[in-house]
Image (cartoon, grey):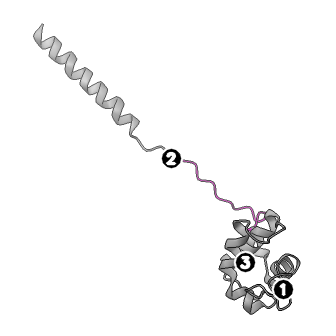
Amino acid sequence: MKNSVQIKKHFFLLFVGFVFASCLTNVDEEVVINDDPAIEDPCSTITYTLNVRPILDNNCTTCHSTNGGQPPNLETFENASANAIIIRSEVVRRTMPIGGSLTDEEIQAISCWVEAGALNN
């Protein structure tokens, strides 16, 4: 009788160990890779000349220009590029432009331009 109880204990412990071990087995997660060439990076088409410059002209240079008098002057690429990180920070936090607001697309365009190196393209 004592042997029978010990055998049952061993089988029970073996069963419990098997159950816990099976729970620890790695499960392959499905990895989704975007191989669709029709879906492209939205930042890939952002340029200073076509996207960022018009945003700055329409929303920033009223104040940040020679006539506006507020630093930094954003009338030229050189000045805009030199202040790119500050520009992105201000528009992402929506503290600039004062008295107006940029659309999410405009903020994304500025962010993309800065992250790509604030190039004169």
Residue 45: image quadrant is bottom right
Image position of 31 (left or right of 75):
left
Image position of 115 (left or right of 103):
left
Image position of 108 (left or right of 55):
left
Q: Label 3, on which residue?
A: 113
Q: Position of residue 105 (x, y in %)?
A: 81, 66
**Most foreground residue, 33 or 56:** 56
Total of numbered circles in the picture? 3
Secondary structure mostly seen in magenta is: loop
Image position of 10 (left or right of 37):
left
Task: Indicate which disc, 2 or 3, sits on the residue closer to the N terminus.
Answer: 2
Kindly indicate whether the residue at mark 1 contacts the one at mark 2 (C-beta within 8 angstroms).
no
Q: Label 1, on which residue?
A: 68
Label 2: which secondary element: loop
Kindly indicate whether the residue at mark 3 contacts the one at mark 1 (C-beta within 8 angstroms).
no
Q: Position of residue 22 (x, y in %)?
A: 38, 35
Task: Indicate which disc, 1 or 3, sits on the residue closer to the N terminus.
Answer: 1
Distance of label 2 from label 1 (alpha carbons): 59 Å
Q: What amino acid is found at the position of numbered circle 2 in the picture?
A: Asp
**Most foreground residue, 120 or 67:** 67
Q: Position of residue 103 (x, y in %)?
A: 82, 64
Residue at point 68%, 84% (across, down): 83
Q: Label 2, on which residue?
A: 28
Kindly report which numbered mark, 1 or 3, lies closer to the viewer in this rendering: 1
Q: Which residues are magenta?
A: 28-41
Q: What amino acid is found at the position of numbered circle 3 in the picture?
A: Trp
Is-magenta flag for residue 56? no
Q: Residues within 10 Å of mark 2 (few under 14, many from 20)?
A: few
Q: Residues within 10 Å of mark 3 (few under 14, many from 20)?
A: many
Residue at point 70%, 72% (across, down): 90
Q: The C terminus appears in which quarter of the rendering? A: bottom right
Kindly report which numbered mark, 2 or 1, lies closer to the viewer in this rendering: 1
